[in-house]
């Protein structure tokens, strides 16, 4: 099954060793199915609140994969297995307490305001659990980034992806604190992004320029209608980007 550009980019960010990966708001399960096929973790969880989605998805996965899903020679060291699980719950209620280990939670396809509410709920319930997040919101990016800064989330990577004329920000984050005085790949979240504006290819640079122009135009258009004293500051911040 070929994934969309957005889901392919999300999967490509998963390079660390996680015990559990949670594909929340999984919809029809395309990403989760790919994660199982590629055995991205010993446990892959597909989560959605709608029974009409989870029930047929569970049946589909049962047809596609054994549980656990095996690859390699069962008698050799190359043998691997991935257990898959489906959960019909609100993503803010995922049962991390029953699954020890390092977790990656993927949240995509919803607004940043709803996204941050779910993250706060999860971290409040599991303050001692090591969690990474991959976020791909559809709107409210600036507000989301402000909330991530307040939560002291640390940034591992941020990228842009263009799909069907829409451009998305994808952030790989951790709830781990920045270690004082140590070199680390983690850094604070930027209010408007940093590396997303610095494409490696001509296509990526063009996407970054297009996305930047869209952001500036959006806030300029909304300025008369939003009662936000920081609107000029937001516009100035985006207009100050000169690296693309």
Image (cartoon, grey):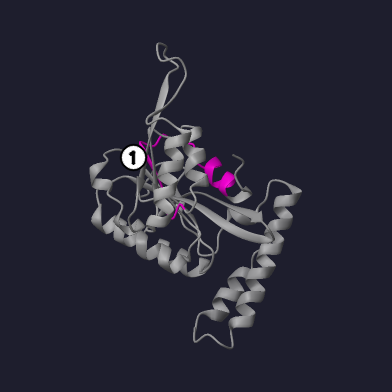
Tag 1's secondary structure?
loop
For the N terminus, which image quadrant? top right
Comparing 37 with 161, the one in front is 37
Q: Is residue 192 left or right of residue 183?
A: right
Q: How many discs mark residues in the rendered view?
A: 1
For the C terminus, which image quadrant? bottom right
Q: Specify the quadrant of the image occupied by residue 169.
A: bottom right
Q: Is residue 174 left or right of residue 209?
A: left
- Residue 1 located within the stretch drawn in magenta: no
Q: Is residue 12 visible?
A: yes
**Residue reaching furthest to the right:** 202
Image coordinates for residue 216, horizontal then vertical, percent:
65, 73
Residue at 61%, 74% in the rendered image? 236
Q: Specify the quadrant of the image occupied by residue 75.
A: top left
Q: Is residue 179 visible?
A: no
Image coordinates for residue 73, horizontal then vertical, percent:
45, 14
Comparing 19 with 157, the one in front is 19
Q: Is residue 67 left or right of residue 224?
A: left
Image coordinates for residue 209, horizontal then vertical, percent:
71, 61
Residue at 60%, 75% in the rendered image? 235
The residue stretch that appears in magenta: 7-26
- Residue 15 located within the stretch drawn in magenta: yes
Residue at 41%, 67% in the rendered image? 114
For residue 30, above or below residue 19: below
For residue 131, above or below residue 66: below
Q: Is residue 139 left or right of residue 150?
A: right
Image coordinates for residue 10, horizontal then vertical, percent:
54, 47
Q: Residues within 10 Å of mark 1 (few under 14, many from 20)?
A: some
Comparing 156 with 83, the one in front is 83
Disc 1: which residue: 102
């Amino acid at each position: 099954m070929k994934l969309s550009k957005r889901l392919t980019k999300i999967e490509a960010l998963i390079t660390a060793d996680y015990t559990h990966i949670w594909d929340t708001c999984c919809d029809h399960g395309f990403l989760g199915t790919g994660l199982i096929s590629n055995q991205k973790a010993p446990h892959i969880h597909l989560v959605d609140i709608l029974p009409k989605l989870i029930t047929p998805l569970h049946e589909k996965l049962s047809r596609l994969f054994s549980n656990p899903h095996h690859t390699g020679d069962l008698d050799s060291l190359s043998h691997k297995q991935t257990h898959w699980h489906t959960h019909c719950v609100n993503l803010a209620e995922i049962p991390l307490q029953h699954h020890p280990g390092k977790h990656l939670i993927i949240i995509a396809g919803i607004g940043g305001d709803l996204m941050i509410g779910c993250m706060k709920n999860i971290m409040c319930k599991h303050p001692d659990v090591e969690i990474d997040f991959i976020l791909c919101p559809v709107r409210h990016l600036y507000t989301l980034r402000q909330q991530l800064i307040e939560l002291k989330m640390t940034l591992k990577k941020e990228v842009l992806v263009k799909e069907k004329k829409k451009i998305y920000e994808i952030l790989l984050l951790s709830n781990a604190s920045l270690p004082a005085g140590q070199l680390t790949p983690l850094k604070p979240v930027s209010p408007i992004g940093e590396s997303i504006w610095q494409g490696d290819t001509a296509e990526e640079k063009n996407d970054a320029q297009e996305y930047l122009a869209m952001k500036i135009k959006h806030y300029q258009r909304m300025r008369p209608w939003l009662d936000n004293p920081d609107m000029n500051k937001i516009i100035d911040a985006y207009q100050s980007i000169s690296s693309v």
